[in-house]
Image (cartoon, rainbow, N blue to C red):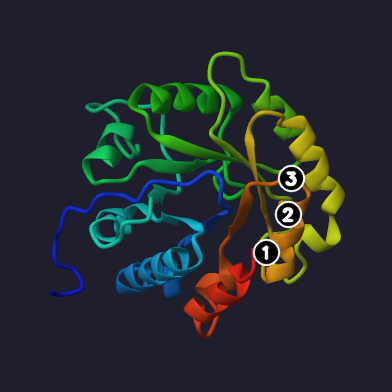
Amino acid sequence: MGLFSKKSLVVRQLDYSRPFVVINLKTYKESQGRNAVRLAQAAERVGEKYHINMIIAVQAIDLKEVASQVKIPVYAQHADPVVVGKSTGGIVPEQLLDINVHGTLLNHSEKKVPIKDLQNTLLRLKELDIKNIVCVANNIEAKKVSSFKIVKPDFIAIEPPELIGGDISISSSKPEVIEKAVSACSGINVLAGAGIKDNMDVKTALRLGCKGVLLSSHYVRSINPEQFLTELVRDI
């Protein structure tokens, strides 16, 4: 069976008693096209072996291919509060479902969303039962997003932008930010992101009350992504 042969896969159910590892492939050259599929398949193998909830967020142009090849949940990196029809350039939530994509990141530091648009997008996603992870840069944003009245996020990911893509992680340099986020987002699952690169980063995040972690470049650009991910999740 070829790498890009089409097939309909049943997405594996998430186990909320186990940790989550969310991988954002961004738009690195190492994560495009066939590489996106390979990275998703490696994450699937590691998740299955170590009983970790793996979620992979893929750039829009690769969503359909990746979602046709893996059973782990595939998320978009963004969605818009738009409908089918006159929405040029928009990522329409209904169309995500049509290609077996069941979730999305929102408000990443590289794709910030006005607060009103964020609320409207969450409402649209809730109508369609599409899961979401809302990224926040600090605990002021975390408190604001967690206090939405009509609809709340499924996950909030705390990611100080100055640490994203760097060698210093939020777990090692700003553990107090994680603690405050968990407290501010009471009742909502929290992920720690920015600079996550090793097993201790994950263990620290979990110890401080997070449900898991959100990472990107250290996985995507590693020499051996599957080995990197194996070391990241061992013994957690």
Q: Residue at x 50, y 84 (%)?
A: 224
Q: Which residue is mark 2?
A: 205
- Above or below: residue 27 compared with residue 146: below
Q: Nearer the viewer, residue 88 or 126?
A: 126
Q: Tell me the CA gap for discs 2 and 3.
A: 7 Å
In which quadrant of the rendered view does residue 235 lie? Answer: bottom right
Q: Which amino acid does the dot numbered 3 rest on?
A: Gly
Q: Nearer the viewer, mark 1 or mark 3?
A: 3
Q: Tell me the CA gap for discs 1 and 2.
A: 10 Å
Secondary element at image label 1: loop
Residue at the extreme top of the image, as rendered: 150
Q: Which residue is mark 1?
A: 196
Upstream in sequence: badge 1 or badge 2: 1
In which quadrant of the rendered view does residue 217 lie? Answer: bottom right
Q: Quadrant of the C terminus?
A: bottom right
Upstream in sequence: badge 1 or badge 3: 1
Q: Position of residue 135 (x, y in %)?
A: 61, 42
The answer to whether 217 appears left or right of 91 in the picture is right
- Labels 1 & 2 near each other (Cβ < 8 A): yes
Q: Position of residue 71 (x, y in %)?
A: 31, 57
**Total marks drawn?**
3
In which quadrant of the rendered view does residue 125 lie? Answer: top left
- Above or below: residue 136 compared with residue 194: above
Q: Position of residue 1 (x, y in %)?
A: 13, 74
- Labels 2 & 3 near each other (Cβ < 8 A): no
Secondary element at image label 2: helix
Q: Which mark is residue 209?
A: 3
Residue at the extreme bottom of the image, as rendered: 223
